[in-house]
Amino acid sequence: MKTSAARLGLTAAILATLTTAPAFAYEAGDIIVRAGATNVNPNDDSSAVSLNGSAVAGSGVSVNSDTQLGLTATYMLDSNWGIELLAATPFSHDISGKGTLAGQGKIASAKQLPPTLSAVYYFDTEGAFDPYIGAGINYTTFFSEEGEGNFTGYDVKLDDSWGLAVQAGFDVQLSENWQLNGSVRYIDIQTDATISNGTNTYTVDVDIDPTVVSMMIGYKF
């Protein structure tokens, strides 16, 4: 009970500090740049894998997660609205068989970049905690595709993707210029994958649809 009370007291103290600390409001023309860890965690789903045009019953593929350096730049149109661009160092993903293809293990790998342009809205607050929401357009380009395991040497191609992106996040103002930032996004990413050795061609439609979580430090110019 004492531990729980202490935790509640600490939480209340932190919230009180955030809501009573001096506010450093954004203004039109402010530019905010951020950098930090960004994790792409696919909520993947796929069609059955087709071999030379015939579906392999019960088959599918999965895509693993990856963490890289995420970067954002935001230009404030006024005290509430801004335009944000998300960039990152390339994410690397392994593609593995599942269902009746689970025994194949890793079948391919690829890198991707997911630049995302969003409109963001900051809610009016009186303290150092500034929550916001946003929505925009994502373009994901895939490159360095390679066959793996039993598919080493196969040609691999993943089509680029356009999709919608939504997000929610917050800034904690540390000073007039420095801040901590956290955000979570959902991005609609779909791709058609082709793996071929000239004789056998495997195709599969993959909905990657990742949850993207970032923790960053930012600076306002």
Image: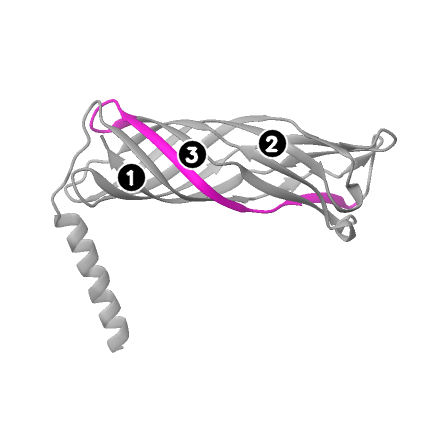
- Point 44% across, 41% down: residue: 69
- Point 21% across, 64% down: residue: 10
The circle drawn on residue 76 is none
Amino acid residing under circle 1? Gly
Answer with left or right where residue 21 lies relative to residue 45: left
Badge 1 crowding class, 10 Å Cα cut-off, few under 14, some 14 to 19, many 20 or more, is many
For label 2, the SS is strand
For label 3, the SS is strand
Which of label 3 and label 1 is nearer to you? 1
Which portion, as a residue range, is magenta?
Answer: 58-81
Q: Above or below — where is 73 with respect to 148?
A: above
Amino acid residing under circle 2? Gln
Label 3 sits on residue:
166
Answer with left or right where residue 115 lies relative to residue 108: left
Label 1 sits on residue:
218
Q: Position of residue 165 (x, y in %)?
A: 46, 32
Which sits in the foreground, 88 or 202?
88
- Point 20% across, 54% down: residue: 15
For label 1, the SS is strand
Amino acid residing under circle 3? Val
